[in-house]
Amino acid sequence: MKDLFSEQSELYQQARPSYPQLLIKSVLMHLNHFERAWDCGAGSGQLTQLIAPYFQTVVATDLSQSQLDQAPAFANVEYLQQAAEQRAFPNQYFDLITVAQAIHWFDFEKFYAEVKRTLKVDGIFAVIGYGLLQLDDQDLNDRVLRLYRETLNSFWDAERRYIDEHYQTIPFPFDEIPMPQFQIELTWTGPQLWDYLNTWSALKHYQDQLHVSALTDLQDILQIQKPIQVTFPVLLRVGR
């Protein structure tokens, strides 16, 4: 598992989108019990905080302690710094195991062995994420698309392709449950969009290698105060 986000933990927590409540409820409706959940690759707790109200206990793990330090505190949530593939829990322990916007960084074979070992017989495993954002301003959308596909093309980690392929090409050795499609719909200002773009891992790789910012030509975004409608396609695989 890679750790690409420790250095920007605070920005990541502030700028990354959250998930619709309807999505959470659509996953939880397939559960029979709500004793324990494991949110793996939890980062700064974007998904953890959404599932916490439904369970007696939630364990949230991440490779990055600095990311976990940004996560909100709940009485029933325990945050643990550890790799996704680490053997840390008893057999058949969890009713729900989730991974949000992180599965593409994992060693699939080792992690799935842990999922199958620690998930209860009637438990649910859910892989959640979001794809490339779309903006209602077509000119701005085209510029961000060029940044993503052209300027940063060779700076994305190879694993990013799984997101571009909407998680449909990840290994998924589970009995899959058909799920409805969801999207994240937000209203941002220019500075909020700027902050989000600054969380892209490829942007950091570009800066580290070329010693210039890939966002120089987009700095006018910071001046946009009118609302920008932003949509992210939700990626979702759920199985037993």
Image (cartoon, helix red, strand yellow):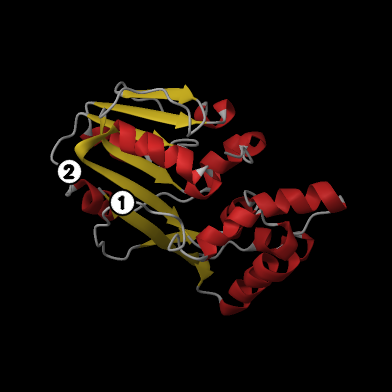
Report how many numbered discs are placed on residues in the image: 2
Q: Residue at x 59, y 54 (%)?
A: 159
| In the depicted structure, whether residue 186 falls above or below residue 239 | below
Q: Nearer the viewer, residue 149 or 46?
A: 149
Q: Residue at label 2?
A: 31
Give the side of residue 183 with respect to residue 227, left or right. left
Disc 1 secondary structure class: loop
Label 2: few (<14), some (14–19) or many (≥20) C-alpha neighbours in 10 Å: few
Q: Quadrant of residue 113?
A: top left
Q: Position of residue 86 (x, y in %)?
A: 47, 28
Q: Residue at label 1?
A: 174
Q: Residue at x 28, y 51 (%)?
A: 239
Q: Which mark is residue 10?
A: none
Disc 2 secondary structure class: loop
Give the side of residue 29 with respect to residue 231, left or right. left
- Please indicate, yes or no, whether residue 71 appears anywhere in the rendered image: no
Q: Quadrant of residue 219?
A: bottom right
Query: What amino acid is at disc 1?
Result: Phe
Q: Nearer the viewer, residue 237 or 195?
A: 237
Q: Residue at x 61, y 37 (%)?
A: 3
Label 1: few (<14), some (14–19) or many (≥20) C-alpha neighbours in 10 Å: some
Give the side of residue 152 with respect to residue 60, left or right. right
Q: Residue at x 45, y 23 (%)?
A: 80
- Please indicate, yes or no, whether residue 172 appears anywhere in the rendered image: yes
Q: Nearer the viewer, residue 111 or 31?
A: 111
Q: Position of residue 163 (x, y in %)?
A: 51, 59
